[in-house]
């Protein structure tokens, strides 16, 4: 019995087969992820290095950028190498040939960079090796504003209450905050006072860095568990920084940081601005996981934003 003959003699069986196929198709359609962009790479890898101390672009290029260029310039399938050196920051962008496996390219770039990492100045921050993809584009931007609060106050509230709440949503990969200046503790040294106490600048910087640590010093083992022992040395207030001993005079008196410097509770210099209808705001850029459904994640974000409106200050 061939297929046409079986279909005519068994109409109910064939109807059930088609219904099953239709149901499978509907279920597959409902489970199909919705993407705004294909999950492809731009074929570029960026190495971003920030340098403390406000080093000018010429020294950044000489001490950082050139070393990085020489190290990663021999990576396989590299087509173009571009670098940008500016005050306190070095950026090296590697462009690869189409069809290059970017995972292996990123791995080889890290291996090449690791060879010169120890040769870079001690003032550098932790280097960032980033591979930008289409899926890294934010699927939603949430803006927070106030008629009475400054953008710095809004940012503090957003960092403490809204950012982590949005990151806990299933399917959200990362949340970046823009707008409003970040808090910083500014220590302005007085050269005349340092000279009067015969105190080098490097010694003050070293003491401040060594006094602001949180280190694991050991552990106490028991039968079923163990206790970790940590040296808690992080500063808790500006007054603790001001009263930090930096030197001892021959007569036994102590020189404190406030005697040779001015300690200010200030903000970082703005590197970007967020605006909505000309008004300054604090924006949250929400990125989703590459395999998550865009529509479902966006709906969950909207639900969380409605909940946050009831929790956050009204003004």
Image: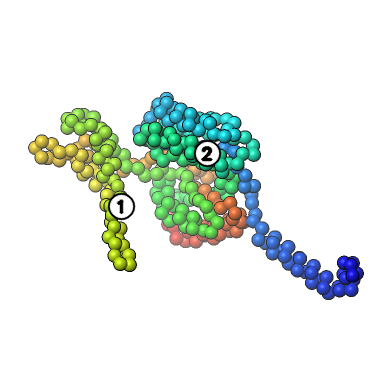
Is residue 84 at least partly visible in the picture?
Answer: no
Q: Which residue is drawn at the image coordinates 49% and 43% (left, top)?
A: 274
Q: Quadrant of residue 78?
A: top right
268 relative to 2, above or below: above
Q: Quadrant of residue 260?
A: top left
Q: Which residue is drawn at the image coordinates 42% and 51% (left, top)?
A: 159
How dense is the environment of label 1, judged by Cα within 10 Å: few (below 14), some, or many (20 and up)?
Answer: few
How dense is the environment of label 2, judged by Cα within 10 Å: few (below 14), some, or many (20 and up)?
Answer: some
Mark 2 and mark 1 lie on one chain; the one further toward the N terminus is 2
Q: Which residue is drawn at the image coordinates 52% and 52% (left, top)?
A: 173
Q: Residue furthest left?
A: 251
Quadrant location of the C terminus in the rendered image: bottom left
Label 2 or label 1, whichever lies nearer to me, is 2
The residue pinned by badge 1 equals 216
Left or right: where 84 falls relative to 120: right
Alpha carbon distance from label 2 to label 1 = 33 Å
Q: Position of residue 187 (x, y in %)?
A: 29, 38
Q: How is the image coloured?
A: rainbow
Between residue 237 and residue 247, name the one nearer to us: 247
Left or right: where 190 falls relative to 295: left
The residue pinned by badge 2 equals 108
Left or right: where 181 falls relative to 36: left
Marks 2 and 1 in Cβ contact (< 8 Å) = no
The total of numbered circles placed on residues is 2
Is residue 18 at least partly visible in the picture?
Answer: yes
């Amino acid at each position: 019995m061939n297929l046409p003959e079986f279909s005519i003699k068994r109409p109910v069986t064939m109807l059930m087969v088609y219904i099953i196929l239709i149901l499978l198709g509907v279920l597959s359609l409902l489970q199909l992820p919705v993407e705004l962009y294909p999950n492809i790479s731009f074929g570029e890898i960026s190495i971003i290095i920030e340098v403390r101390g406000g080093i000018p672009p010429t020294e950044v290029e000489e001490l950082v950028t050139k070393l990085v260029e020489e190290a990663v310039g021999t990576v396989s399938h590299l087509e173009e190498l571009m670098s940008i050196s500016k005050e306190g920051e070095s950026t090296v962008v590697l462009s690869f040939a189409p069809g290059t496996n970017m995972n292996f390219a990123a791995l080889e770039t890290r291996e090449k960079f690791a060879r010169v990492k120890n040769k870079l100045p001690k003032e550098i921050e932790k280097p960032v090796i980033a591979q930008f993809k289409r899926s890294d584009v934010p699927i939603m931007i949430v803006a927070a504003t106030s008629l009475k609060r400054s953008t710095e106050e809004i940012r503090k509230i957003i960092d403490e209450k809204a950012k982590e709440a949005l990151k806990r949503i299933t399917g959200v990969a990362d949340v970046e905050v823009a707008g409003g200046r970040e808090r910083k503790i500014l220590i302005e040294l007085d050269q005349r006072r340092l000279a009067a106490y015969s105190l080098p600048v490097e010694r003050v910087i070293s003491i401040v860095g060594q006094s602001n640590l949180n280190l694991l010093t050991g552990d106490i083992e028991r039968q079923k568990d163990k206790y970790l022992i940590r040296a808690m040395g992080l500063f808790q207030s500006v007054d603790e920084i001001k009263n930090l001993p930096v030197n001892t005079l021959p007569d036994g008196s102590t020189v404190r940081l406030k005697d040779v410097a001015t300690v200010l509770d200030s903000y970082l210099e703005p590197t970007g601005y967020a605006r909505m209808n000309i008004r300054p705001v604090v924006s949250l850029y929400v990125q989703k996981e590459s395999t998550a459904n865009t529509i479902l994640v966006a709906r969950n974000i909207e639900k969380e934003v409605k909940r946050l409106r009831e929790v956050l200050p009204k003004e």
